[in-house]
Image (cartoon, coloured by chain):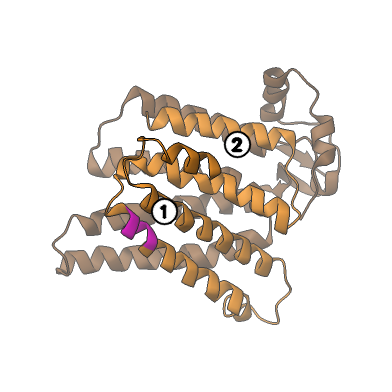
Chain colours: A orange, B brown
Amino acid sequence: MSVLLTASQGSMFAGLEKYIIIWIISVFISSVAQIMLKVEANKEHASRLKEYLNPMVVGSYAIFFLSTFLTMYALKYVPLTYSPIIEPLSYIFVPVIGVLVLKERISKRRMLGIVIMFIGIAVFSM
Amino acid sequence: MKKTNKGTFVGEVPLKWFILLHLSLILNSLAGTASKLAGRQKFLSFKFMFWYGVMLFITMAFAVAWQQILKNMSLTFAFTNKPITIVWGLVWGVMIFRETLTWKMMLGSAIILIGIIVGVSDVSGPAGEKTETAGIAADSVKELTGQSTETDALQEVKP
């Protein structure tokens, strides 16, 4: 994010910095919600219903809901063409938070796969 | 893909859950299609309500499936497969909305698929168990990186 913030001091984003940051926050909180779902999925539950009706899962979907509004708000000002740059940030946020919070480990091969996917997304949206 | 005495695995995940993961990701991509179909209708018209309802239904079905999927694999594994929704979005775009397919989209999709294959391939089975029949994907990674994949496989820890 700091790279974007530094870049935004130039004319590249033409006054859209605030809305781009709101969009990035939206992607970030969605990624956090994914982690919350996984935290709850790792727990044992008394019943199938309790796997869904608990504060973490309900909270996660509340965050997803909030995130759609934040994205829509940002999209009022930021062109949709920025989407292929901002939305894939979740493919960075989720593994990074996953490693930090869930202590999941990523092999070098998986990291290579993620890098290749980013090249693919870049080519796709060129 | 590899066979172990505990069944067939894709990376660290049993084949059954790998297939269910991909079915749920197809469902996820269809939610976007339903949302787009709703967006093309007059706001609050019958057709709009219908497609919006379809979108909500698919989203809820996905949410139910996703929680079960997360119980059976690491979040990083599931997310390494997620970009396939971009490719499915392209398929629905061409089939349903007759969107034009550019060579960049096709090349990008192919690279995304290679990335997924590389990212999910693993020569270790459940709990780091080593097998003799490493998958084609894992072999192609060896060719790509020019290194043995065993060290990577041993670093992998199951959730």
Q: Viewer-proximal residue, A100 or B62?
A: A100
At which x and y percent is residue B68? 61, 64
**Residue B38: horizontal and vertical position, in percent?**
23, 59
Q: Which mark is residue A23?
A: 1
Instruction: Tell me which chain the residue with mark 1 is part of.
Output: A
Tell whether A83 sits left or right of B118.
Answer: left
Tell me the mark number nearer the camera, choosing from 1 and 2. Answer: 1
Q: Which residue is mark 2?
A: A114
Task: Give me the disc on residue B115.
Answer: none
Which residue is depicted at the point 16% across and 65% down? Answer: B43
* Residue A121 covered by magenta stretch: no
Per the image, label 1 sits on a secondary structure element best described as helix
Q: Nearer the viewer, residue B122 or A73?
A: A73
Which image quadrant is residue A55 in?
A: bottom right
Is A71 contained in the magenta span?
A: yes
Quarter of the rendering containing residue A35 = bottom right
Q: Secondary structure at mark 2?
A: helix
Q: Chain of mark 2?
A: A
Mark 1–mark 2 Cα distance, whole angstroms, equals: 22 Å
Image quarter in which the C terminus of chain A is found: top left
Q: Amino acid at mark 2?
A: Ile
Question: Quick one: A72 or A109, which is closer to the camera?
Answer: A72
Q: Identify which amino acid the numbered label 1 is placed on.
A: Trp
Mark 2 closeness class: few <14, some 14–19, many ≥20 residues within 10 Å = many
User: Which residue range is magenta in the image?
Assistant: A70-74
